[in-house]
Amino acid sequence: MKKKVLAMFLCCGLVMSGLTGCGGSSGGGEGAQNTQTENEQPAQAEENTQEEASESADAGGSGDRPTVSFVFTKGGFEGYPDNDVILQKIEEAANVTLDHIAPPSANYAEQVNLILSGDKSELPDLVRLNAAMFNDLYDYVDQGALMDMTELVKDCPNILKNVPQEALDRCTVDGKLYAIPMFCSPNRYNVVIRQDWLDNLGLETPVTLEDYHEVMRAFTFDDPDGNGQNDTYGFSGISMEALDFLYGAFGAMAPIPTYNAVNTYWYLEDGELKPQVTNPKVKEALETISAWYKEGLIDPEFITCTTDDDLNNKAMKNQFGISYHWWTWEPKIEAQLQEVDPNISFSRIAPPVGPNGDSGVRGVNLCNGCVMMLQGADNPEACMRLMDWMYSEEGMMTTYTGVEGIHWEQKEDGTYVTLPQFDEDASWIQWYSVFEAEWPLLQVETPLVQSRRDSFQWKTINNDGDGLTTKAEVEYGADLQAFSMESYTNFITGKTSLDEWDKFVEEWNSRGGAQWTEEINAEYKDKRG
């Protein structure tokens, strides 16, 4: 069976040259995914196949169902249990046997490359590209590796109803649809604060940038956890992404793509797209950030903090009071912390208001990845039927919240509530969540839902270049990202003076940034007609 061969490839860890589209990408999710994601931030996931569950379903009378082999991993969730009722529901409702191939999320793109480098007779039917891999779609199209879904999608009412045309357009090349997008709304991030620390020190919730500074200072120097040790920082987070809310106080956005950003962010000024990485407002933000870093308010290890596990370890040790992350992070870590100390509590608060009244968090791109169908898929109609069901209300509810009557139920007043089994299965319940299912996230009263609802309160600073791709980005993007990351790190830590800002801008442009800017503006104007 396909699942056995592909699992063998994954276990062997062979290095094989493959389709160029996957080379050099890194996995995301919803979040880092993203996306990180909904990037959400990915965690190491065990490699899984569905052989046992599928064979069990076949024994129960589903042998006539066509098999759909599907490569995807839901970062941040564990694999399925022995009694996989969600898989059973998916297969019954979509009338397929799902051969789920789930590479580890930590090196998802690398493993996808490995899979697609294998024997053509053993290739899967469907493959999910995460946010950081989205542009690989166009390489696969150029290589003739993908199925044209233009006509097939016409028989998919749920996709056509629930996926915006703009998102479908992102997966369309020369008038042909080559993937089904994982579209999402821009509001995904929250600023979170240790409410118990605020209460311990008698402080009010910070509002302005100055308020934030004073609270971070108190969290750093006034022993907010009461242990008598000088072992806390005002702020920590996951790498450069964690500073988004501080750039937002200056009307700009973090210029470095990390967990859920596919490329550098762009802003419109006088009808022209300009890169956030060289935005003069970013320089203003860096002056504040570097001053706070020098003052000792910012955890110096935030730059090398790259995963949820890294940040969780710091949280478990009471090392910081403010952070900024994908909406799913804080409810999970708060629950873990309260098992140790029930007095610990977090609050989600508005990002700071800057000196000119600006405020905002990162607005994620419209597409958090996509699902492509390979040429030679055994049963294209079954593949489309599965994806269309996943975009139905029943499919979204099932893949995000579990099975009706087992994990959740709808009350007479129309509200949705979880049942005890939901908590029992919380560690894996979104294992089959391929697409960004906004609807159930906002409907069902889960431990995470209020965090999601709160994220809609904050203004987002969006990428005005979202969806625009250029040859210069492919050629220079990776080098420019590495150069920018190193430069910004040096600015923040004081290794390089901000007096060198103009020199940095000049070098960014000379390394291909100027060409990228020229090409993306040409693309922008062309799409505007």
Image (cartoon, grey):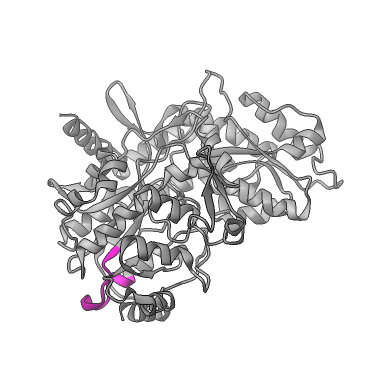
On the rendered image, what quadrant is the N terminus found in? bottom left
Q: Position of residue 164 (x, y in %)?
A: 29, 39
Between 526 and 287, the one nearer to me in the picture: 526
Front one among 159 and 179:
159
Identity of the residue drawn at 61% across and 26% down: 209
Residue extending farthest to the top is 356
- Assess whether residue 469 is covered by the magenta stretch: no
Q: Is residue 317 visible?
A: no
Q: Which quadrant of the view contains residue 376?
A: bottom left
The quarter in which the C terminus is drawn is top left
Asked whether, in this view, residue 162 is left or right of residue 300, the answer is: left
Task: Say which of 318 and 384 sits in front.
Answer: 384
Percent position of residue 102, x then y: 41, 68
Q: Position of residue 91 (x, y in %)?
A: 36, 65
Viewer can see residue 194: yes
Q: Which residues are magenta?
A: 114-126
Answer left or right for 404 relative to 324. Answer: left
Q: Which residue is found at the position 57% from the left and 40% from the top?
A: 451
Q: Nearer the viewer, residue 269 or 168?
A: 168
**Spot occupied by residue 395 in the image (x, y as percentages of width and height):** 38, 53
In the image, what residue occupies the spot 26% across and 67% down? 125
Most extreme residue toward the right, as rendered?
228
Relative horizontal placement of residue 123, taking residue 293 as reference (left or right): left
Residue 116 located within the stretch drawn in magenta? yes
Look at the picture and state if 102 lies above or below 476. below
What count of labels does the image hold? 0
